[in-house]
Amino acid sequence: MTNQINYTDTDLCVKCGLCLPQCPTYNLTKNENESPRGRLALIQGWSEDHLELTNTLSEHIDNCLTCRACEQMCPAKVPYARLINDFRGDTNTTEHNKLSLLERSFISRLKGQYRKSLNFFLRFYQKVGLSKLPLQLNTYLPAKISSNQFNETYPTLVAERRGHVALFTGCATEVLDSKTLEDTVFLLQHCGFDVSIPPNQYCCGAIDLHAGNHQQALKLAQNNQNTFDNTHYDAVITVASGCGSTLAEYDHALSKKVVDISDFIAPYLSTLTFKPLKASAWLHTPCTLKNVHPSTTDITELLANINELNIRSFEPNQMCCGAAGSYMLTHKETATTLRDQTIAPLKDHTIDYLLTSNVGCALHIRSGLKQAGLNTTTLHPVSLLAQQLKV
């Protein structure tokens, strides 16, 4: 993750248009400036002094969700996300400054080592009723913030010890979805692994990277590299695909050890026994698992270990749900439209569980399901496996 700006890579774009059907904002607006090739043309024009940096130009760039679906289709392999992030860093024109003071403070503390104090504040915030204030942030807070604290080490719970792994908690997951972390530790222990949770973890840097704060993102990356620089770890496990994809792109040996939890546990589930569950589940695949750090595991095959579970998936060409990190806070209208399009197919079915491997997607989709009046529980696939594990 470096900040070596080279806008000449915009020349790689041959304007073929294969990216257009993949782009959420282009499909919503049919505006060329809201497409990948349009944004590249704007950046190219600005970098060559043919275009001035206007609010309109900046908004077109900032409206990008950085879902990176376009990169998967690009025959020229244009480094689109890097160019977008570099532009944002060069111009400092993202929408983060439009957030409320409370929301900016929340994101700031979420990224650092103040997550324990943030956890306490959010529980107090909910207890005294402040969560009823009309803030966009409240839409995404779970009904109850967990007060659970994690140990630094968890020994395996089975006779055959297979190894020792570290768990990257992720800032949002630790504060807003700690149950997924608990379930991950539980499954790893039963798969035969000792689990370490190093205490000095930081945000992976994705929020700063996509906001153009390159130096801060690099600092966070270096801190995490120091924290996880332990040759005794067989792997560094991630549960949020956004974190996993960012860590995997670190310019450091750590990136080679990063493994998504679903990929990691896949070889060991056959040694476990799961209780049957007569229920329906709909599987959502986050953009980061499709476009950035593709999973090597068919999660439906993992879930098939649970007998009687009826599993369905979104279409392979399903677009971004609109969460996109903090995008759901900074671009509420677009994010809500994309979210509602995502959950639309669910309205014609009775779905017990919506399963997704990214905490941002989970929070965003859960809010849409609630507003639509759908009685569907949103979980990480690992949590459903842990729930049904027979011990």
Image (cartoon, rainbow, N blue to C red):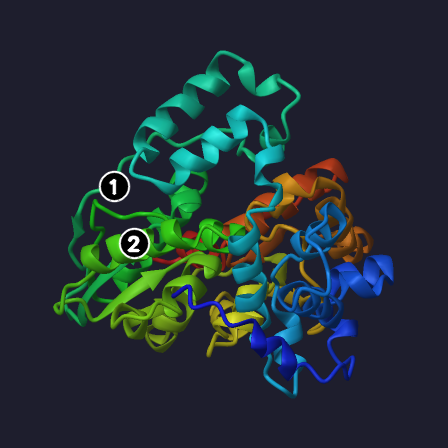
> Could you say whether the residue bearing mark 2 is in a helix, strand or loop?
helix
When the figure is inspected, residue 253 is found, relative to residue 24, above or below; the finding is: below
Residue 308 in view of the camera: no
> Could you say whether the residue bearing mark 1 is in a helix, strand or loop?
loop
Provide residue 130's location: percent of width, then percent of height: 54, 15
140 or 387: nearer the eye? 140
Q: What amino acid does circle 1 point to? A: Phe
Marks 1/2: CA–CA distance: 10 Å
Badge 1 or badge 2: first in the primary sequence = 1
Mark 1: few/some/many CA within 10 Å (<14, 14-19, 20+): some
Q: What amino acid does circle 2 point to? A: Val
Residue 166 in view of the camera: yes
* Residue depth check, mark 1 versus mark 2: number of the one nearer the observer: 1
Query: Which quadrant of the figure contains the C terminus?
Result: bottom left
When the figure is inspected, residue 227 is found, relative to residue 134, above or below; the finding is: below
Q: Residue at x 56, y 67 (%)?
A: 83
- Residue furthest front in the image: 49
When the figure is inspected, residue 263 is found, relative to residue 362, above or below; the finding is: below
Tell me where residue 345 sits by quadrant: bottom right
Q: Residue at x 37, y 29 (%)?
A: 119
Provide residue 315's location: percent of width, then percent of height: 72, 71
- The residue carrying mark 1 is 150
208 or 259: nearer the eye? 208
Provide residue 366's location: percent of width, then percent of height: 63, 43
User: Which mark identifies residue 356?
Assistant: none
Query: Which quadrant of the figure contains the N terminus?
Result: bottom left
User: Which mark identifies residue 185?
Assistant: 2
Mark 2: few/some/many CA within 10 Å (<14, 14-19, 20+): many
Provide residue 225's location: percent of width, then percent of height: 24, 60
Verify CB contact (< 8 Å) between mark 1 and mark 2. yes
Total numbered circles: 2
Q: Residue at x 65, y 47 (%)?
A: 365
